[in-house]
Amino acid sequence: MTEPAPDPLERLRERLAACPDGEVRTGTVAGFGERGDVLVQLDGDDPSAPTGCIPRHLLSWAVFEDPSEVVSLGQRITAEVFGANERSGQVTLSAKACEDEALYRYLRRTRRGDVVTGTVAAVHNFGVFVRLDGEPAHPAYPGTGFVRLPELTWSRIDHPEDVVRPGQRVTGEVLGTDTHQGEVVVSLRALQEDPWDGLAAGTGEVVTGPVTKVIPFGVFVRVGEAAEGLVHESDLDGRAVREGQELMVTIVEIDRVLRRIRLAPAE
C-alpha cells in the first residue's frame, strides 16, 4: 500500500518551527533580492530554493552601498532568526546581530532585572547612550546601554539633559536586550522611588505647590515630591500664572491607573 505523500504545508510548518526567534543558524549566501535583501540557503533545508532572507538593514554594522560589498555568493554566513513567515515560508535573519561576536555574547548573557552601572556617553532628544562597565566596544554606537526618555526619571522633563549629562556615572536596571539593535535597554527610573507611592494627599484636599510648567491649555503644579497635577486654563479664569509661582490648589481627581491628577485653584 502506497504511503500518502507528505503534506507540503505540514512540512513547511515543521521547517519553520525549527527556526524559533533568537536561534542562531548558518547557511550559504544564495542570491540578492531587488530591495537589497540577501537570500540565504539555510543548512538542512530543501536545496531547491533559499529559505532565509536578510533584510538590508540587518546585514551589517558597516556602512555600504550594495550588499555585495559585504557578502558574496557562496559565502558561509551566521545569523540570528528574526522571524518566520508561515505563509511565504521565509525565515527573516539578522547577520548584524552575530557580526560582532564579543557584543553578541555580552548581550546574550545580560538578563532582564540585572543592575548595571556605566558612564553617560551621549545625550539626544530621543534617548541616552550609556557606556556600561565591562561592555565590549560597540561597532556603531557610543555605548551599548540605551535609556529611553520615559525611563530616565519619574519627573516630567523637557530634555534628557535636565537629568543626565555626558560623563556622568549612572546606575540602572536592565529592561531587556536587543541583539538586532545591539543594545541593552536600561531604566534609571526603575531604581528610583515612585513619587506616587508616597502621595499622601487625597481628593478634596487643599495643597500648595510650585507651578512647574505653563502650557497653552493650563499649568502643572507639583503636589508631591515629584507628582504633578494639571489646572486647566478654563479654571484659571484668565489669571496669569508663571513657572515657579506657588499656587494653592484643590485636588479634584486622582487617577492612579493613568497617573493623572486634576486640580483647581483653591483661592
Image (tube, rainbow, N blue to C red):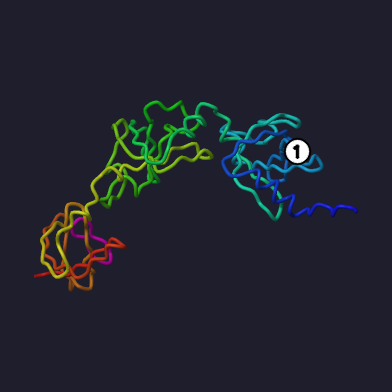
Estimate how packed mark 1 is, as few (under 14), some (14 to 19) or many (20 or more) residues with alpha carbons within 10 Å: some
Principal SS element in the magenta part? strand
Above or below 99: residue 46: below
Q: Is residue 182 left or right of residue 237?
A: right
Seen as rendered, the residue at the extreme front is 1
Above or below 187: residue 267: below
Question: Mark 1 falls on what kind of element?
Answer: strand
Q: Is residue 242 left or right of residue 81?
A: left
Seen as rendered, the residue at the extreme left is 267
The image shows residue 67 at horizontal and vertical percentages of 67, 36
Q: Amino acid at mark 1?
A: Gly
Q: Is residue 53 left or right of residue 167?
A: right
Tell me, yes or no, whether the highlighted magenta stretch contains residue 217: yes
Q: Which residue is mark 1?
A: 31
Q: Nearer the viewer, residue 23 or 191?
A: 23
The image shows residue 249 at horizontal and vertical percentages of 13, 66
Query: Based on the displayed image, in which of its 4 quarters is residue 254 positioned?
Result: bottom left
Q: Nearer the viewer, residue 87 or 210?
A: 87
Q: Residue at x 16, y 63 (%)?
A: 241
Magenta span: 211-222
The image shows residue 7 at horizontal and vertical percentages of 78, 54
